[in-house]
Image: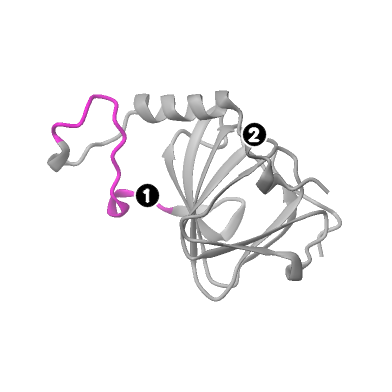
């Protein structure tokens, strides 16, 4: 079976370039203490991030940092998972990259979810996920915050084999 964690080359240079360009060009409110920030800079402290219920999973919260994952173009978003939150097997239509900001994140690949095969990714971990790869994810005894980057529109396809 193909192991996406070993396939760092799936992160297309164009995805990375587009995400970096969007970070440089996106407009955002700049706090007063950052008057010297360059025009077009995105500067968000955690207290300025706008959190809302995740429309794909109401038990989670999402904050769009750059772009909009539901629309065409690069996006960066953070997602908060409460403790013991499980997402059954599913796929996404776009290549994605993830950074675990806090907590420990668990992931396994395939059309069924075998929790014994889940890999623990502690805070600071990074991984890429090719488009349309079936996987399941979970938080366990602590909340988790992820940062997700990709080129939208994003989506989720829940798999019938999910158990």
Taking 80 as reference, is 27 left or right? Answer: left
Please tell me whether mark 1 sits on a helix, a strand or a loop.
Answer: loop
Taking 117 as reference, is 15 left or right? Answer: left
According to the picture, the residue beneath numbered tag 1 turns out to be 50
Which region is colored magenta?
A: 35-51
Please tell me whether mark 2 sits on a helix, a strand or a loop.
Answer: helix
Foreground residue among 126 and 41: 126
Question: What residue is drawn where x is 29% and y is 26%?
Answer: 40
Among the 4 quarters of the image, the one containing residue 13: top right
Foreground residue among 25 and 110: 110
Say which label, 2 or 1, has the lower sequence index.
2
Q: Are marks 2 and 1 in contact (CB under 8 Å)?
A: no
Colouring chosen for the image of the structure: one colour
According to the picture, the residue beneath numbered tag 2 turns out to be 9
Question: What residue is drawn where x is 48% and y is 65%?
Answer: 103
Q: Position of residue 134 (x, y in %)?
A: 77, 49
Q: Position of residue 157 (x, y in %)?
A: 74, 46
Cα separation, mark 2 vs mark 1, equals 33 Å
Question: What residue is drawn where x is 37% and y is 49%?
Answer: 50
Among the 4 quarters of the image, the one containing residue 108: bottom right
């Amino acid at each position: 079976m193909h192991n996406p964690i070993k396939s760092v080359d799936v992160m297309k240079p164009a995805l990375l370039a587009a995400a970096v360009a969007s970070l440089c060009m996106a407009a955002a409110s700049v706090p007063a203490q950052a008057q010297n920030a360059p025009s077009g800079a995105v500067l968000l402290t955690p207290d300025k991030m706008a959190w809302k219920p995740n429309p794909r999973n109401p038990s989670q919260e999402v904050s769009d940092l750059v772009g909009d994952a539901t629309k065409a173009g690069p996006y960066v978003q953070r997602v908060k998972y409460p403790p013991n939150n499980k997402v059954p097997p599913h796929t996404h239509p776009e290549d994605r990259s993830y950074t675990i900001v806090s907590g420990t994140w668990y992931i396994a690949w395939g059309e069924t979810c075998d929790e014994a095969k889940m890999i623990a990714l502690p805070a600071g971990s990074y991984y890429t996920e090719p488009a349309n790869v079936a996987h399941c994810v979970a938080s366990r005894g602590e909340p988790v915050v992820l940062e997700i980057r990709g080129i939208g529109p994003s989506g989720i396809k829940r798999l019938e084999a999910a158990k």
